[in-house]
Amino acid sequence: MHVEDLLRLESLDLTLLWGDRPQLTREISGVTATDLEDPGRFLQRGELVLSGLVWWAPADDEAKAERFVAALEEAGAVALLAGEETHGGVPEVLVEACRRHGIAILSVPVHTSFRAVTDTVYLRQWGDLSRRPAAPYALPENVRAELSRLLADGTDPDTLLTRSVAHLGTPPAYVLSATGRTIARTPTAPPLPARRAAEAVTATTTLSVDPDASPYAQWHLHLPEPVGTPPRMLHEIAEVLAQHRRASLRRETTARGRAADLLALIDTPSSAAAPAALGRALEACGLADQDPYTVITVKGAADDDGAVDALTEALHHLTDCGFAVGRLPTAEPGEATAVIGTRTGTGTDSGTETIATTLKNLWPTLQSRNTKVPLHGGISTPATTPQSLKGALTQARYALTAASSRRAPGTEAPTSNLTAIEDLTTLDALLTGIPADVRTAFGIHALGPLADDTNPSHRMLLETLDVFLTHNGSWARTAEALHLHVNTVHYRIQRVEMLTGRDLARLDHKLDLKAALLCR
């Protein structure tokens, strides 16, 4: 396949920014996606380079683009396909650098994914592995023929990985998920603890199987020991695994459709979904007779599908639980929900506790896969029957709101958080689950004129009220904390009572004003 072949494909909608006949007729041997500023050591001769241009900024000097393109030329790359999404177009300085170094440059529009380009190249080359000439490939023809047959038969990933590296002496090799789950390993590879596997995913010796997938959904090929194998061969093995991955993604898409139907029934506006319909939906998702059920809702960025992928990846760590992940009809953008079934033999309390503990321990690793987007989640208490799933969903969404309200210490920025409904054991924690606009309205009406803290006198009274309630209504300790005379404290509290219409001798009025202060 030549560079010019890509330009002829209307489905890709690529635009040639620079390239003459000699550049456009170069043979493509493979594809590498990178956003490294200096990618040279990871490239192979004849490869097409995909870059989202994250490494470049408008304030950068011309030399930065020059170094990037020089690395492509030195490695023998045939062309650069630059994504338009990051900067709204391809910087002219990069086009000029490609012109100087004789590297064809094509722009990739926002509506064309890098995966589509990769699929186009490899499907053209690998459409039938067993009948292609061996010259462009590093894998032997007989190995390609066997892998083609295994893919067609839908073999399991362990077998596929083992046969992919058998001609290399079957070295230890793994296929790892983004958070360190072992999806496949060869017989010579010992079990790899999830923590070590998560570290291995970010190692420079690990290849991404599907670099165009979301950060939470990627698979990685990891060989912990050097095998002296040409990098091109490892890339071809990764591409075989990618084809298997795409088949599994198609199955996940189908399962998410069934999960969406289940969630729509649970979230029905009526008092309860018809038991028969709910039972059929649970059965379609493989969750029949797996009660008690736990509901979890997760929210990430509003403009992508990351939350669905993140939640799916997290729940794969619950090896003893079935689950169904999808979107609610009433979901906010970037929100995903799952129903988790606790399999027979696992007690209600212990099963739910294990779910919450496992996911909370995993959350920092999951968040580290996309640090730019805080990932929040809420977990319900157990729903002992299908009919009580509606209540569990309400709990999960309330806990999600509480998680989203948490702020990093000393900042106004939200911090990634997973909150279980059982975590809301204080008044402050309970109030965090109330929508912000409702909390603000409550604070304004409960505090009355004192809600206007631009008034210095009101700020003073609010401080006195806060200290008074913190010290359980003790006049002496409040006076000591504020360095005031007790009579002054009495006067200020009387002013608070007059302005708010509350009697601070009553416990319920104290709770009202404490909640109002927490809602500010």
Image (tube, helix red, strand yellow):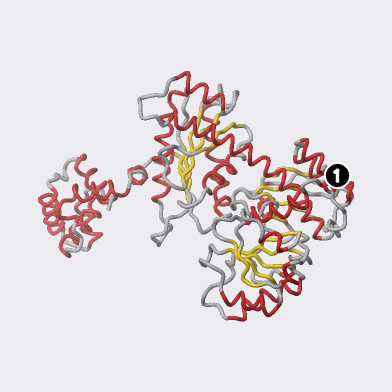
The image quadrant of residue 286 is top right
Image side of residue 358 versus residue 426, left or right = right
Image side of residue 451 versus residue 261, left or right = left
Res. 196 visible in picture? no
Residue 191 pos. (x, y %)? 75, 44
* Front-lying residue, 508 or 103: 103
Image side of residue 90 versus residue 102, left or right = left
Residue 182 pos. (x, y %)? 70, 44
Instruction: Identify residue type, mark 1.
Output: Ala
Residue 206 pos. (x, y %)? 73, 56
Q: Is residue 133 above or below residue 281?
A: below
Crowd rating for badge 1 (residues with CA inside 10 Å; few <14, some 14–19, many 20+): some
Question: What residue is shown at x 48% (from left), y 50% (from top)?
Answer: 300
Image side of residue 135 versus residue 104, left or right = right
Which image quarter is the N terminus in? bottom right
Residue 47 pos. (x, y %)? 75, 63
Question: What residue is shown at x 72% (from left), y 46% (from top)?
Answer: 243
Q: Label 1: state its secondary structure.
A: helix
Q: Is residue 221 above or below residue 323?
A: below
The image quadrant of residue 502 is top left
Location of mark 1 (residue): 145
* Front-lying residue, 487 or 338: 338
Question: What residue is shown at x 68% (from left), y 59% (from top)?
Answer: 6
Q: Residue lying furthest top in this view?
A: 276
